[in-house]
Image (cartoon, helix red, strand yellow):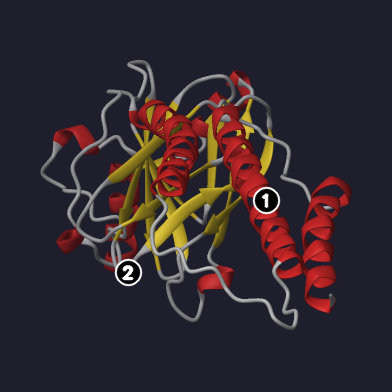
Amino acid sequence: MAVVLVLVVIAVASVLFHLLSPWWWTPIASNWNYIDNTIIITFWITGFVFVAVVLFVAYCVFRFRHKPGNRAHYEPENRKLEFWLATVTTIGVVAMLAPGLFVWNQFVTVPQDATNVEVVGQQWQWSFRLPGANGQLGTSDTRDVSGDNPLGVKKNDAAGLDDIIVEGGELHVPVGKPVKMLLRSIDVLHDFYVPEFRAKMDMVPGMVTYFWFTPTRTGTFEVLCAELCGVGHPQMRGTVVVDSEADYQTWLGQQHTFTQMMASGEVKTTQ
């Protein structure tokens, strides 16, 4: 009976904890409410199965508890039971996977009018690169990373000469416009994550990964690294500031281009 009571308490307490819990998601600030909906669907399916299984185990412990003279019934095969278990399990798995696959397809299908923004992760800081007046990002190579060229932008690529270089971990984006985040790491695995945007992706050395989102409200949001990347991992933080269009243009005009950064570095070297 003690085991039965413990199992029942676990099932009831799990439901009550969900209904009464003070911990909830941060308010969403992007178009990815689909991700919230997918998580909720998965949670309810797995939660229902968890409670059903725990209560079923409690019932079995009580119903088939030891009694003097009782003998166990040996039934090595039950095709009807196996059929229903396989069918219900399949339905549950499909119900969990289908919404996720649908959202994933949206997550990697970038709108044509999205603005490219490169995010560069390295131990333990964030840097960013935005297209300049020509609207294109120049090419880059990790082998070109140096003290005066921290993002490895190729100097012989004319498309990258007017790229906007943002160091210091604070990125600005305009509200209501889609942004494609091009993610690159120059040392180890990182993961660019902004909880309010419900968007994250691993950054793999030697690869360029991506996702897109549309910010839906102005504000300042914290960037986290969601992949253990060394002793400084907890301090690898930054901010994304979502501006009105006017404020964004003002901020953009205050940033330095790759050409200006290189010229400044050459002046310092000469001095």
The quarter of the image holding the C terminus is bottom left
Task: Measuring from the top left, give residue 78's x and y in whole percent.
Answer: 42, 52
Residue of label 2: 188
Please give left or right for residue 207 compared with residue 200 in the image: left
Q: Nearer the viewer, residue 32 or 113?
A: 32
Task: Measuring from the top left, give residue 49's x and y in whole percent.
Answer: 62, 48
Task: Measuring from the top left, give residue 54's x and y in whole percent.
Answer: 69, 60
Please give left or right for residue 232 compared with residue 86 in the image: right
The residue depicted at 29 percent of the width and 51 percent of the height is 263
Q: Name which residue type carries label 2.
A: Val
Q: Secondary structure at mark 2?
A: loop
Q: Nearer the viewer, mark 1 or mark 2?
A: 1
Whole-number angstrom distance, CA of label 1 to CA of label 2 = 43 Å
1 or 2: tag closer to the N-terminus:
1
* Residue 33, visible in the rendered structure: yes
Q: Nearer the viewer, residue 202 or 4?
A: 4
Please give left or right for residue 74 compared with residue 263 in the image: right
Examine the rendered structure and indicate whether residue 242 appears above or below residue 69. Answer: above
Examine the rendered structure and indicate whether residue 71 appears above or below residue 29. Answer: below
Q: Nearer the viewer, residue 227 or 168?
A: 227
The residue depicted at 81 percent of the width and 62 percent of the height is 8
Residue 253 badge: none
Report which quarter residue 69 is drawn in. Answer: bottom right
Residue of label 1: 52
* Residue 181, visible in the rendered structure: no
Q: Secondary structure at mark 1?
A: helix
Residue at the extreme left: 156
Q: Name which residue type carries label 1.
A: Ala
